Image: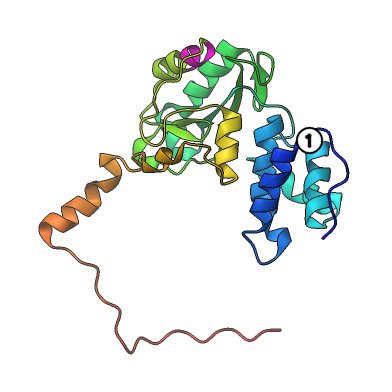
Amino acid sequence: MTQAAENTTFDQSTADRAQAIIARYPQARSALLPMLHLVQSVEGYVSQDGIRFCAGLLDLSEAEVSAVATFYTMYKRRPCGEHLVSVCTNTLCAALGGDEIYSTLKSHLGVGHEETAGEPGTPGSITLEHAECLAACDLGPVLQVNYEFYDNQTSEKALELVKALQAGEKPHPTRGAPLTDFKQAELQLAGFFEGRDADLDGPSAAPETLAGAQIAQERGWDAPAMPSNAEFPALPEKK
């Protein structure tokens, strides 16, 4: 494994965390995804310096790292605000008001998709994006702030939330961990909780999500067991 070229953007603490990430995996290159989150926890996005940092430590080419960083939408190529606000505009949320919520926030902030209101990284700055699906259809329309859920939203509630963020407040998510900022959330996605281990204990399910399971339990419903002699179709021949 080659060492990263000298890079003044990332300090020794970040380099140590990167090595700790690499040590989790039998093959160093498998550490790339959390390392990109680590880079974002420092800069608020994945810069060319961040790409070089990852490439040098993982013995990858910059092109290989760039291919990953540009494939996944969670890796940002422009500096993010203190908070990333993601509005679900996929089919169900859109029909329930997601498009209207996004339009309201877009008008209020004066920005479009993946654009930032305010100086990136400064207190109260907001990066807005529309998300394809946030996997919370039973609670739609939903939005996330730094990947924490705010369920059953309306345009009015979403606007009130964003104004509170701009004013330096951190309204508690509907479920999940207490709200932090984008860089701290990225550090957690890299696997470092920095004294916030209790965040893992935050409620992750809502009553709506558990309703079906509770009804099944009350009525004694169980999924049928798989027969011990179940036959599976043959695998197609490899060509």
- Horizontally, residue 207 falls left or right of residue 231, namely left
Where residue 171 appears, as percent x and y from the top left, is 41, 20
Where residue 47 appears, as percent x and y from the top left, is 78, 35
Name the residue that disc number 1 marks: 47
Does 148 sit above or below residue 210? above
* Image-quadrant location for residue 132: top right
Dominant SS in magenta = helix
Does 191 sit above or below residue 90? below
Between 186 and 64, the residue placed more toward the observer is 186
- Horizontally, residue 68 falls left or right of residue 153, namely right
Q: Residue at x 19, y 51 (%)?
A: 214
Give yes or no for residue 163 being in the magenta stretch: yes
Where residue 11 appears, as percent x and y from the top left, is 75, 36
Q: Residue furthest right?
A: 5
Q: Residue at x 51, y 9 (%)?
A: 167
Looking at the rendering, the stretch of residues picked out in magenta corresponds to: 162-166
Q: Residue at x 39, y 34 (%)?
A: 140
Number of other residues with Cα within 10 Å of mark 1, as a class: few under 14, some 14 to 19, many 20 or more? many
Give yes or no for residue 165 being in the magenta stretch: yes
- Horizontally, residue 137 falls left or right of residue 37, namely left
* Image-quadrant location for residue 160: top left
- Horizontally, residue 225 falls left or right of residue 26, namely left
Number of callouts? 1
Q: Residue at x 65, y 42 (%)?
A: 37
Between 235 and 23, the residue placed more toward the observer is 23
**Amino acid type indicated by mark 1:** Ser
